[in-house]
Amino acid sequence: MAAPYDVIVIGAGPGGYNFAIRAAQLGLKAVVVEKRKTQTLGGTCLNVGCIPSKALLHASELFDEANHGFGKMGIEVKGAEVNLPDMLAFKDRAVDGLTKGIEFLFKKNKIDHVFGAGRIEAPGKVEVELTGGGTETFEAKNIVIATGSDVISLPGIEIDEERIVSSTGALALAQVPGHMIVVGGGVIGLELGSVWRRLGAQVTVVEFLDRITPEMDGEVSKQFQRILKKQGMEFKLNSKVAAIDSSGKTLKVAVEPAEGGDGEELEADVALVSIGRKPYTEGLGLEHAGVATDDRGRVIVNEHWQTNVPGIWAIGDVIAGPMLAHKAEDEAVACAERMVGKAGHVDHNIIPNVIYTYPEVAAVGKTEEQLKAEGTKFKKGKFPFAANSRAKSNDTTDGFIKVLADAATDRVLGVHMVGVNVSEMIAEVALAMEFGAAAEDIARTCHPHPTLSEALRQAAMDVDGWAMQM
Ligand code: FAD
Ligand code: NAI
């Protein structure tokens, strides 16, 4: 029997590791169980998600810029070429540094961790099948399920991670594909599709619905698709992939109308399946422990992150809500605080959402479609980057910012951005919304000149019709 702990955390992703750190700060002794075969901490995000994808997005963006953007600024680059192994090594170094960073933080906070698959035997009891062999049982008053999410595959299509890949395989392709078919025009498809298009692939996105990024504000999706199309990405909307024949040298991909009917066969070197992710609860013993899940397999929790079984809590991708690292982190902090009787809280309406393409997309709060559906009366202000001085001087004028505010109170309800660097601008809006700001508060806040952030101020002014620079 291992040493006594206050809490056993299953999963070392942004949910699990942030929980353990906050719990340690609050005086709880935690042990974190992680089953990843690589025996690294950090979960999906650091190993095969946020971090490696952003490293490749950054490197491929600079390559694209060198080829297509430098010339107009008077910088001559002759023969910029991709050294793919070196680019992948750059990505791997980022992953390695950051996953080791979590080990350091665990040591600093006196958090124990063990590599192996955890299974809940009973409330307060987790059996771990150790990666190195054997089993070990841990007991504690509390258990936190932070097991994250996993790839969804298409029925009848087997992901081999070489030619038919999930995001994990798409982060490590041995060569640039001639033609890549992306199944699903959501975040993963558009980010990783962008990476390989910039490196030279022809990219065709097959999306089931009538628009890409269907969760985003409609006006944003439309302009975003237009920009990606201008960059060379091709789209087949209202379409689905019915089958992939991988018996030949190239993949034969059967694409059909979403409603069914006659389709076409496309040839591709690689197919990326990115149609969403599902909660990861395999082998966790939820049924055995009596932990309730919903119809999508997500662990059900109350507003304090407690499941129906006393002493068992859950956070992150494995529960309802957006599958985002910062959402898992926020829930981790609040859950640890609740565990010690503090008043941890997360406002799920103020979780920013970013797509790290070029340009980026960033949003927080409600979309126009959501406000209309719920019958909220709102005012709208909009400002194009084409009228922003910094965007003009940098020649990065694609995109706009839209501010939605309550018609009666002027309170900011949602902000939607397409443009360069908007990932760094959306936190200002989240902070404003946390403070219950009105659009006028943003409009009357001094923003530095010349910056892209002035476009936000102008959009906020436009809510009351006094945008000054368009
Ligand atoms: P995870 O990070 O999935 O961690 C769960 C961990 O639990 C895993 O390491 C798993 O091995 C372990 N585990 C599961 N079952 C067991 C068990 N029985 N015993 C022991 N261990 C177990 N989000 C963003 O916010 N920004 C981004 O830019 C972004 N980019 C992404 C790019 C890609 C390609 C992908 C796939 C995801 C991306 N995400 C991004 C989403 C983000 O990775 C997740 O929202 C986040 O990792 C969720 O954190 P989590 O702690 O809930 O779960
Ligand atoms: P997603 O939910 O973003 O997009 C899936 C897309 O596939 C949707 O547009 C959907 O309509 C479409 N689709 C579903 N079934 C289909 C089918 N059979 N044929 C064609 N299209 C189909 O899911 P994705 O891109 O797989 O990403 C999973 C999650 O990972 C995201 O929801 C997000 O939470 C997280 N993520 C976040 C990132 C970020 O914050 N920048 C980056 C990457 C992932």
Image (tube, rainbow, N blue to C red):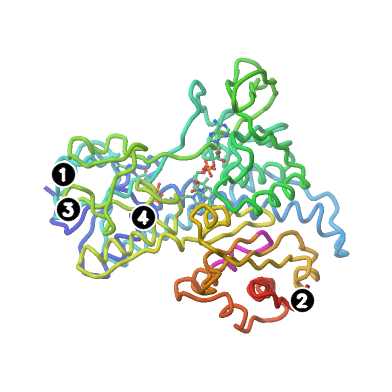
Disc sitting over residue 311 in the figure: 3
Q: Which residue is mark 4?
A: 15
Whether the residue carrying mark 4 lies under 8 Å from ligand 1 is answered with yes
Circles 4 and 3 in contact, beta carbons < 8 Å:
no
Q: Nearer the viewer, mark 1 or mark 4?
A: 4
Tell me: 383 left or right of 128.
Answer: right
Label 1 to label 4, Cα distance in Å?
22 Å
Q: Residue furthest left?
A: 1
Whether the residue carrying mark 3 lies under 8 Å from ligand 1 is answered with no
- Looking at the image, is mark 1 or mark 4 earlier in the sequence? 4
Q: Residue at x 62, y 50 (%)?
A: 56
Residue 349 pos. (x, y %): 44, 61
Crowd band around label 2 with a 10 angstrom C-alpha radius: few (<14), some (14–19), many (20+): few
- Looking at the image, is mark 4 or mark 3 earlier in the sequence? 4
- Looking at the image, is mark 1 or mark 3 earlier in the sequence? 1
Q: Is residue 193 within the magenta segment?
A: no
* Residue type pointed to by label 4: Gly
- Looking at the image, is mark 3 or mark 2 earlier in the sequence? 3
Q: Which residue is mark 2?
A: 469
274, 300: nearer the viewer: 300
Label 1 to label 3, Cα distance in Å?
17 Å
Quadrant including the C terminus:
bottom right
Tell me: 284 left or right of 210.
Answer: left
Circles 2 and 4 in contact, beta carbons < 8 Å:
no
Crowd band around label 1 with a 10 angstrom C-alpha radius: few (<14), some (14–19), many (20+): some
Q: Is residue 99 above or below residue 83?
A: below
Query: Magenta residues, as a range?
Result: 418-426
* Residue type pointed to by label 1: Thr
Q: Secondary structure at mark 3?
A: loop
- Looking at the image, is mark 1 or mark 2 earlier in the sequence? 1
